[in-house]
Image (tube, rainbow, N blue to C red):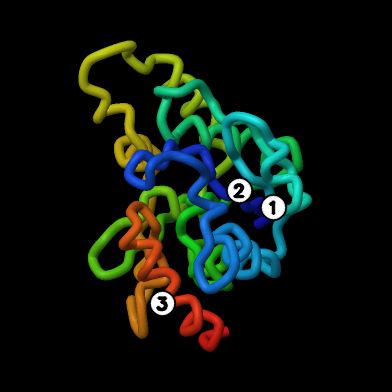
Amino acid sequence: MRFAVVILAGGLATRMGGGDKPLLRAGGRSLLAHLLDRLGGAGGPLAINARGDAARFAAFGLPVLPDGPVGTGPLAGVLAAMDWAAGLGCDAVLTVPGDTPFVPRDLPAALAPAPAVAVSAGRRHHLVALWPVAARDALRARLAALPPDGPRAAFGVRAFAVTIGMRDVDFSARPFDPFHNVNTPADLAEADRLAPRDAARG
């Protein structure tokens, strides 16, 4: 399996007061730097998916894939990831939210084969997933059918994952949940506390 890795940084961070959550710092480093340390040795090409000016990520030296229009949700980022991976001749693409700094180093191998999603402590992490690139046309059609208003649950990440037969892959949440994500200031404080433990975990 040839795979690519895309860090999803297109969220609006409303509970953090806006801005780019991957650029927030925990343990003296940005969340994005933690992620790149965890995934940089995974063996696949890396990119960042984000909306807006790509220059703010220039220091990381990675391709920045434009996000879809505001309102199309995280699946637009997944589609951008699939399209980029397809252009590289990859069979699958791993997506990881940019606010999830402590993922396992062997995440792609642990999730293979696609489609598969990470689960820990009984919680499914819908965007920590290995997606088959072959599903991109179906995803593109799904986003094209997105209703302009009204309920969108049937068009969300979970619903799409069901249509492609996404498997659950369980990960241990000890000594701490490797999929701790930063949505609030309290989550960021916890990430700062966990960072030394993550460094010790190697």
Q: Residue furthest bottom?
A: 200
Residue at figure coordinates x 39%, y 59% from the top left: 181
Q: Which label number is shown at residue 46?
A: 1
Residue 176 pos. (x, y %)? 36, 78
| Callout 3: SS | helix
Q: Is residue 192 above or below residue 200?
A: above
Residue at figure coordinates x 45%, y 54% from the top left: 128
Q: Which residue is mark 2?
A: 6
**Left or right: 72 as drawn, with respect to 122:** right
- Closer mark to the observer between disc 2 and disc 3: 3
Specify the quadrant of the image occupied by residue 14. top left
Q: Which residue is mark 3?
A: 193
Residue 9 pos. (x, y %)? 53, 44
Quadrant of image for the C terminus: bottom right
| Callout 2: SS | strand
Residue at figure coordinates x 41%, y 30% from the top left: 73
Q: Residues within 10 Å of mark 1 (few under 14, many from 20)?
A: many
Q: Amino acid at mark 3?
A: Arg
Q: Nearer the viewer, residue 88 or 75?
A: 75
- Disc 1 vs disc 3: Cβ atoms closer than 8 Å? no
Q: Which is more N-terminal, label 3 or label 2?
A: 2
